[in-house]
Image (cartoon, helix red, strand yellow):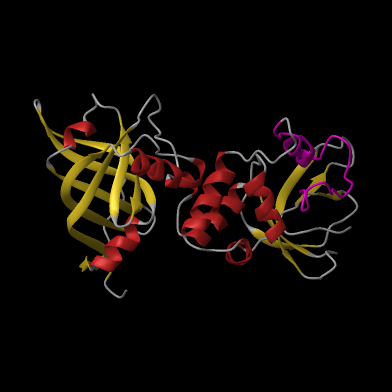
Amino acid sequence: MRAHLGDQLVIESPATGATRRDGEIVGLHHADGTPPYDVRWSDTDEVTLVFPGPDAHVRHVEHEMGTREPSRPGTDEAVAVSDSTSPHGTPNPGDIGRRLAVERTRQGLSRTETARRARMAPDYLAYLEEQPADPSVASLIRLADALGTTTAALRGGGIDLPPGQGYALLHPQLRDLGPDECRARLSTHGVGRVAVSTPDGPAVVPVNYEVIDDAIAFRTAPDSVPAAAVGTEVAFEVDHVDEAMSQGWSVLAVGTARVVTEPDAVRRLVDRAHTTPWAGSERVMWVLIQPMRLTGRRISPADQ
């Protein structure tokens, strides 16, 4: 018997062949994958040292694409999920995999480092990110801890709720961000909010934006609310909230907005755009905000 981290150990009834107990292998004691194993049981979430008997077998997770170790017929769940690929055979990750990859990349972590923090094999993490897998609760807990987030966030829970509903830090520190820090947090693109005055009063609307040569640019439709920004002084805000750590930051840019009409300038903006507007439809009017004031604040623990 050989196993990898992330595989399942299944204990069957000798009489019926039905699963009596199963758990995730979270620790190996031999480099060749032979027993004993540290197993986190699915029914209790406790970890115990296990020396498998004749009524036990390993249910292998696919650790390398296209390679699978043999398992008993009808028990290999990895077979079912690994077939969920696009028509061209390319990986088709599920929502959890996409959220894992995005959060890991946002924090600048490699798969190897993330897997080390989560105490799992890098190949298994690659499998989770690239295939529509359904990791165990124990795996999700360790991944959430490694990334400083929550299992609910990795599953997409709370997507329809406003951020920041957690408790405040015990000893928070609020500090101003310098211009360079503000520019770094604006990054090259993202989703921000533009505040404009309209005939019906002030309005704040989200837009997909680009940062090009220190200017903030976004696409909109001529008759839309964001188009009312043209020719006026507006405020543009972007922020991030870390729900798990009850901290975050915000950056505010204030400047005059103008419409970009020169064909070469429009073509340059289109060529450098990272994404199309999430709102869809025809949004071909480019608005440029040249910040005259750039300020920001960050909430973090007092000892950081």
Which residue lies at the image location 17% right of the left edge and 32% below the top edge?
228
Q: Is residue 69 above or below residue 262?
A: below
Drawn side of residue 159 relative to residue 132, left or right? left
Closest to the observer: 246 or 291? 291
Asked whether 166 falls inside the magenta stretch, the response is no
Which residue lies at the image location 37% right of the left edge and 34% below the top edge?
160
| Residue 43 in view of the camera | no
| Residue 290 in view of the camera | yes
Q: Residue 294 is drawn in which quadrant?
A: bottom left
Magenta: main secondary structure equals loop
Which residue lies at the image location 33% right of the left edge and 36% below the top edge?
219
Asked whether 65 falls inside the magenta stretch, the response is yes
Q: Is residue 215 above or below residue 75?
A: below
List x then y, in percent, for residue 296. 22, 60
List x then y, in percent, for residue 40. 66, 56
Closest to the observer: 276 or 48? 276
Closest to the observer: 204 or 218? 218
Closest to the observer: 203 or 288? 288
Q: Report the quarter where the C terminus lies.
A: bottom left
Chain part drawn in magenta: 61-86
Which residue lies at the image location 45% right of the left edge and 54% below the top edge?
149
Residue extending farthest to the bottom is 303
List x then y, in percent, for residue 12. 83, 43
List x then y, in percent, for residue 205. 24, 35
Q: Is residue 227 above or below residue 147?
A: above
